[in-house]
Image (cartoon, helix red, strand yellow):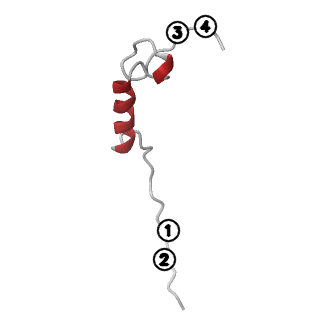
Protein backbone atom coordinates (compact mmCIF):
# COMPACT_ATOMS: atom_id res chain seq x y z
CA UNK A 1 0.00 0.00 0.00
CA UNK A 2 1.23 3.51 -0.69
CA UNK A 3 2.42 6.02 1.90
CA UNK A 4 -0.37 8.43 0.95
CA UNK A 5 -2.08 10.19 3.83
CA UNK A 6 -5.55 8.83 4.42
CA UNK A 7 -8.23 11.20 5.58
CA UNK A 8 -10.99 10.72 8.11
CA UNK A 9 -14.30 10.09 6.30
CA UNK A 10 -16.14 12.27 8.85
CA UNK A 11 -14.04 15.45 9.18
CA UNK A 12 -11.32 14.95 6.49
CA UNK A 13 -8.42 15.41 8.96
CA UNK A 14 -5.50 12.98 8.58
CA UNK A 15 -6.42 9.58 10.00
CA UNK A 16 -4.67 8.32 13.13
CA UNK A 17 -3.41 4.72 13.17
CA UNK A 18 -5.06 4.11 16.54
CA UNK A 19 -8.55 5.05 15.25
CA UNK A 20 -8.09 4.09 11.60
CA UNK A 21 -9.82 5.03 9.32
CA UNK A 22 -10.87 7.91 11.58
CA UNK A 23 -8.83 10.68 13.18
CA UNK A 24 -10.27 10.33 16.68
CA UNK A 25 -12.66 8.39 18.89
CA UNK A 26 -15.16 11.21 18.42
CA UNK A 27 -15.31 10.70 14.65
CA UNK A 28 -15.51 6.93 15.12
CA UNK A 29 -18.45 7.44 17.49
CA UNK A 30 -20.16 9.81 15.03
CA UNK A 31 -19.87 7.13 12.34
CA UNK A 32 -21.23 4.43 14.67
CA UNK A 33 -24.18 6.65 15.61
CA UNK A 34 -24.97 7.16 11.93
CA UNK A 35 -25.03 3.39 11.39
CA UNK A 36 -27.21 2.81 14.44
CA UNK A 37 -29.66 5.58 13.45
CA UNK A 38 -30.03 4.20 9.93
CA UNK A 39 -28.38 7.15 8.18
CA UNK A 40 -26.32 4.75 6.06
CA UNK A 41 -29.24 2.50 5.13
CA UNK A 42 -29.60 1.62 1.48
CA UNK A 43 -33.09 2.52 0.27
CA UNK A 44 -34.99 -0.34 -1.30
CA UNK A 45 -38.37 -0.83 -2.85
CA UNK A 46 -40.44 -3.63 -1.44
CA UNK A 47 -41.68 -5.82 -4.26
CA UNK A 48 -45.35 -6.63 -3.97
CA UNK A 49 -46.69 -9.45 -6.11
CA UNK A 50 -49.27 -8.40 -8.72
CA UNK A 51 -51.55 -11.30 -7.86
CA UNK A 52 -52.11 -12.68 -4.41
CA UNK A 53 -52.80 -16.41 -4.47
CA UNK A 54 -55.49 -17.68 -2.11
CA UNK A 55 -54.86 -20.84 -0.15
CA UNK A 56 -57.02 -23.63 -1.58
- Do callouts 2 and 3 mark residues in contact (Cβ within 8 Å)? no
Question: Can you say whether 11 is above or below 39 in the image?
Answer: above
- Residue drawn at point x = 39 percent, y = 21 percent: 24
Q: In the image, which is nearer the foreground, mark 2 or mark 3?
A: 3
Look at mark 3 in the image and give the residue it sits on.
Answer: 5
**Image position of 33 with respect to 13: above or below:** below
Viewer-proximal residue among 27 and 44: 27
Q: Mark 2 points at which residue?
A: 52
Alpha-carbon neighbours of circle 1 within 10 Å: few (<14), some, or many (≥20)?
few
Callout 1 touching callout 2 (CB < 8 Å):
yes
Q: Distance between the residues labelled 1 and 2?
A: 7 Å
State the residue in front, 14 or 56. 14
Q: Position of residue 51 (x, y in %)?
A: 49, 74
Which one is in front, 50 or 41?
A: 41
Q: Split into 4 quadrants, where in the image is the N terminus? A: top right
- Decide which of tag 4 and tag 1 comes sooner along the chain: 4
Which residue, given by chain and number where applicable, does mark 1 sit on?
49
Amino acid sequence: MSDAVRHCPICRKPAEERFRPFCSKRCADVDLARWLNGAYAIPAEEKVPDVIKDDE
